[in-house]
Image: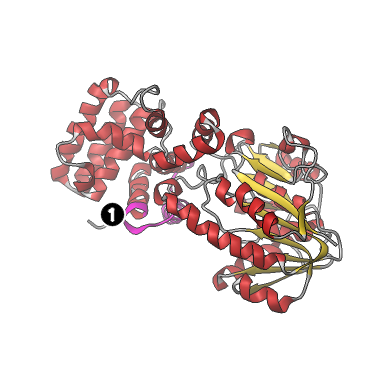
Amino acid sequence: MTTRTATTARDLALNVLLSVETHGAYSNLALTNALRHKRLAPRDVGLATELVYGTIGRMNTIDFYLTPLLKTPLHQLEDWVRNLLRLTVYQLVYLDRVPPFAAINEAVEIAKRRGPKASGFVNGVLRAFLRKKDDIKMPSRERNWVKRVSLEFSHPEWMVKLWEQAYGREVAEEICKANNVRPQVSLRVNSRRLTRDELLRQLQDSGVQAHASSVSPYGILLDQGLDVTKLPAFQEGLCTVQDESSMLVAQALAPSSGMRVLDCCAAPGGKTTHLAELMGDEGEVLAVDIHQHKIELIFNIADRLGLQSITAQAGDIRDVVGDAGMFDRILLDAPCSGLGVIRRKPDLKWGKVPGDVHEIADIQRELLHTAAGALKPGGVLVYSTCTVAPEENEAMIAAFLAEHPEFSGDPLHPHLPAQVMEGTAEDAFSVQIFPQQFGSDGFFIARLRRNS
């Protein structure tokens, strides 16, 4: 089947779902591209966005509901039929504002345009679901807690087990719940140009509803969905888009003016530019990324923010640091399983398998050992990930310190907000941020010092 031109929000959403499932496209990129090429009213843009992220985010639950209604297994249906059923069941279960028969009628109309013979089948399955949905029972918590949470909050069972074993059932369930909440857009003020309060006033004076972040002193949350790139403040380099948890990483490194700083896995440049801002744009930030095509992204954001202290080069950090000399500060925001950003990238949870965590941990270990060798005595290294998995986080740092007696943990409390460090010991040098704590991304941050 060839993808048809989208004529409605649901058509567009269906095309994006097909791109994700059949071509391995990333949902956020596929959606952005589809919206750019099809002019929809703002209300329809919101609906299409909700349908894409919601349907992908609730995939295994939707499939659980559909399976008993089908004689043909779900995976054997035509791709577009399967995904049309999914996005319609998502509306019937999770969107109160969409009248059930309106959602079904729209699905039937789409089916008539794409494959008329399938329209009766689509209609029959969806109306059967409406009649029988209250009879479809989920597994009981007592008999199979993991399976119940997996289906109720739409996560793979292995992921639920990982979090249950690491943090207990209550926290594991809270993580799953939080991953289904759509994130707000957060901006980081360019502190070289103005204060956060000044930027807030500018936004509010121009009719943009926003409020200060409680997580980062540099963060602002937008209370409405809009295209940030069209904001004058963004175009003029007064701010950039960055998650609140991610903003804490540069703060944890706490670089000073005149320092020589290495950012190991730097693209697209959010943390790189934050480091330069915290240094007053005085000194040197060497940004390295393995992907040549991403170096331009770093330069683009640095240019827009008016930062001069950043240099960037493509290459494997394991090859670069041997020739680069020694650094006062090093940031290793390591490649990771990404289990902390599922709320932004819901397709991520269905594309991962347990082995991915072990595999990426081997790479993280090697990068950490390599970066550590380029740090001056007395210097500070921050290791961070956007994941929630002990093997990549706490266990990684514990193993590193056991093998490197020349390093020790350096307290984070002086550098991060009190609410972020709440509940940790006064000398804590690492922190795991969960997505349910502040509505920000799940992140791990550890601060290490090379003993002088």
User: Image quadrant for the N terminus?
Assistant: bottom left
Residue 41 in the magenta stretch? The answer is: yes
Tell me residue 339's x, y (percent): 52, 46
Report helix, strand or loop for mark 1.
loop
Residue 278 in the magenta stretch? The answer is: no
Q: Toward which corner of the image does residue 209 lie, by quadrant? A: top right
Left or right placement of residue 282 versus residue 337 in this view? right
Left or right placement of residue 150 versus residue 200 in this view? left
Residue 265 can be seen, yes or no: no
Front-lying residue, 215 or 423 = 423
Tell me residue 200's x, y (percent): 75, 41
Front-lying residue, 17 or 410 = 410
**Measuring 67% from the left and 47% from the top, which residue is drawn there?**
187
Tell me residue 307's x, y (percent): 76, 64
Left or right placement of residue 99 versus residue 193 in this view? left
Q: Toward which corner of the image does residue 153 lie, by quadrant? A: top left
Above/below status of 74 relative to 294: above
Q: How many marks?
A: 1
Residue kind at label 1, given as amino acid type? Arg
Tell me residue 439's x, y (percent): 60, 36
**Measuring 79% from the left and 52% from the top, which residue is drawn there?**
191
Colour scheme of the picture: secondary structure
Q: Main secondary structure of the magenta part?
A: helix
Above/below status of 145 relative to 324: above
**Measuring 59% from the left and 40% from the top, which residue is drawn there?**
184
| Residue occupied by mark 1 | 4
Residue at far bottom of view: 323
Front-lying residue, 65 or 357 = 357
Residue 58 can be seen, yes or no: yes
Above/below status of 301 relative to 340: below
User: Image quadrant for the C terminus?
Assistant: bottom right
Image: magenta residue range: 20-43
